[in-house]
Image: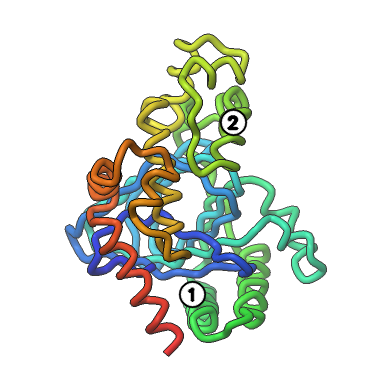
Amino acid sequence: MNTVHSGAYCEPCCIKDGHEIEIHHVSYRQKEHYQCEMHFHEVQELIFFEQVEGTFYYHQGETTLRPFDVVYTPAMETHDFDLTNDAKSWYIVQFPKALFETEQFSGLSSLFEVGMHLRIPDAYQAQLLQIIRWAHESFNSDKYHAKSIALLNLALVILKEHGEVKNAQVPRILSSRSLNAKIKPVMEIFRKQSSVVLSLEEAAKKCHLSPSYFSRVFKSIFRFSYSEYVVRHRLYHAARMLGQSRVSITHLSYDLNFSNPSHFIAQFKKQYGCTPNRYRKAIMTKYAKNEA
C-alpha cells in the first residue's frame, strides 16, 4: 500500500488469498509521520529502497541504510527500522518460502536462508530498481502475476551475482537468534492464530520459562510487553481482514476478542492513525484503481 497520504504504519502488507507474491510501493514526504516496531512476518520479505537514511536492526545486529540498498528477512525473523525524517521510499516484496522450492528459484535458495542487508554497486542500482518497478506495475495489472514472479527471479539473480552483504557493525542481544529460540513456541502460536488468548503465565509455561524471565525476553525482542504485543497482533490481523473481506467492524471486533467495537476502533486508530472504516475504504479504493 502506498502510504503517502494515509500516514499509516507501513505494516501490514500481506499476501492475498490465492496469490504467490505481493508487491507494494511505500513513500513518505520529508518529516511525514513514520512508525515501525520490532516485528516478524509469516512470509519472506525483500525491501528495495529508493530513498532512505537510517538503521536496519535484525538478528545479526544493526547496519546503516543508504539509497538503493536491499534488505531480506526470512519468515518468523524479527527485525526493525529506525529511519530519519528525510523523504523516503521503497518497494516491499513478500512471498511464501515455498517459492524457493520451485524449479525457477531453487538455485537461489542457498543465498536467502538468513536475513541480510545488501549493497548494490553503482553500475547495477538503476537496473535493479527498474526491474522491481516493472514487477510492481505487473503485479498491479496482471491477475496471475507470472510476469511479476519472473521479474523477481531476475532481481534475485542480480542480488546473488552483484550484491555485497553488509556485516552488522554493532551486534545487539535484543535481536539475537538465541532469544528468538527461547520463545519460539509462543511465536508459532502468534503465527497461526489471529487472536492469541494466552495469559503471560500460560505463554511462559509453553516456553518452559518463568513468567518474569519470559516477560524480559519477550520485551527485549519486541520492545513491548507481552500484553501490549497481544493487542498489536490482533490489530495487525484486523488490518489484514479489513483489506481482504467485508466482515463488519462489529463482528471483527468480537472475533478478535476486543471487549466491544468502540474499544476496537479506539485501539485501531491509536495504532494505525485512522479508523477501521477509513482504513478499509483506502484499501478498497487502491484495489479499484489497480483493477481499472
Residue 110 at x, y percent in the picture: 75, 53
How many neighbours does mark 1 have within 10 angstroms: few (below 14), some (14-19), or many (20 or more)?
some
**Horizontal arrangement in the rendering, residue 14 relative to residue 64 (left or right):** right
Furthest-left residue in this view = 31
Amino acid type for the residue under numbered disc 1: Leu
**Horizontal arrangement in the rendering, residue 45 relative to residue 262 (left or right):** right
What secondary structure is marked by label 1? helix
Residue 123 visible in this rendered orientation of the protein: no
**Horizontal arrangement in the rendering, residue 165 relative to residue 255 (left or right):** right
Q: Nearer the viewer, residue 73 or 192?
A: 192
Mark pair 1, 2: CA separation = 31 Å
Q: In front of the other: label 1 or label 2?
A: 2
Q: Establish if 48 lies above or below 146.
A: above
Residue identified by numbered label 2: 177
The C terminus lies in quadrant: bottom left
Q: Residue at x 45, y 42 (%)?
A: 39
Residue 11 at x, y percent in the picture: 40, 54
Q: Residue at x 45, y 67 (%)?
A: 91
Q: Nearer the viewer, residue 114 or 120?
A: 114
State the image quarter where residue 183 is shown. top right
Residue 126 at x, y percent in the picture: 47, 77
Q: Which mark is residue 66?
A: none
Q: Residue at x 34, y 65 (%)?
A: 280
Q: Which mark is residue 129?
A: 1
**Horizontal arrangement in the rendering, residue 80 relative to residue 145 (left or right):** left
State the image quarter where residue 259 is shown. top left
